Image (tube, helix red, strand yellow):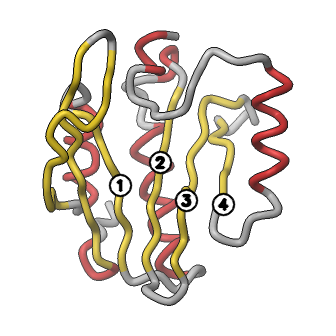
Amino acid sequence: DPDVLAGLTVAFPQPVEGFREWLRATRTLDDQLHLVIETLDAEPVGVCGFNRIDGRARDGEVGIWVGKPYWNRGYGSDAMRVLCRFGFDHLNLQRITLQVYETNPGARRIYERLGFRTEGTIRRGQFVRGRHVDVHVMGLLAEELVDE
């Protein structure tokens, strides 16, 4: 879906086998962790995870995408809250970062409700739908996570 892809830095479309190979490859990396987001009925609705984990700095960078039919149903908010709690409680992180495009204000509002703060802007940092867009860098410290 072009609306989902507009928020991602990875190149799509690609063959299903290419996506599966990427998932298999990430399982062998110590600095990444990718998880499928599922409904209570085990229906996959998206992916979230840590794209980079720095054990020395105890910092991790997260990413997420949810299929458009599942937008505005709480899956993204819930997945991000669980992912951040997992990062702080089980990966021993003290800080989590993410990047969000200026063209995705809904996601930015979700991140802010979880406690993320904007720390800077990479001006014209990505090329989306034929134009350059700003990328907002957001950060969350362990004690700032809002558990609703």
Kindly report the distance in space between the C-alpha atoms of the residues bearing marks 4 and 3: 5 Å
Against 85, residue 72 (above or below) is: above
The residue wearing badge 1 is 98
The residue wearing badge 4 is 33
The residue wearing badge 2 is 63
The residue wearing badge 3 is 50
* Amino acid carrying mark 2 in the image: Gly
Q: Quadrant of residue 71?
A: top left
Spot occupied by residue 27 in the image (x, y as percentages of width and height): 80, 58
Judge from the rendering whether residue 87 lies leftward or rightward of residue 100; answer left or right: right
Kindly report the distance in space between the C-alpha atoms of the residues bearing marks 3 and 2: 6 Å
Spot occupied by residue 131 in the image (x, y as percentages of width and height): 23, 15
Q: Residue at x 47, y 78 (%)?
A: 88
Q: Residue at x 50, y 60 (%)?
A: 82
Sequence-wise, the earlier of marks 4 and 1 is 4
Judge from the rendering whether residue 128 lies leftward or rightward of residue 25; answer left or right: left
Q: Mark 4 falls on what kind of element?
A: strand
User: 62 or 71: which is nearer to us?
Assistant: 62
Against 75, residue 79 (above or below) is: below
Q: Mark 1 falls on what kind of element?
A: strand
- Identify the image quadrant of the C terminus: bottom left
Sequence-wise, the earlier of marks 2 and 1 is 2
Q: Residue at x 54, y 32 (%)?
A: 10
* Amino acid carrying mark 1 in the image: Leu
Q: Quadrant of residue 117?
A: bottom left
Sequence-wise, the earlier of marks 3 and 2 is 3
Disc 4 + disc 3, Cβ < 8 Å: yes
Judge from the rendering whether residue 57 lies leftward or rightward of residue 129; answer left or right: right
Disc 4 + disc 1, Cβ < 8 Å: no
Q: Mark 2 falls on what kind of element?
A: strand
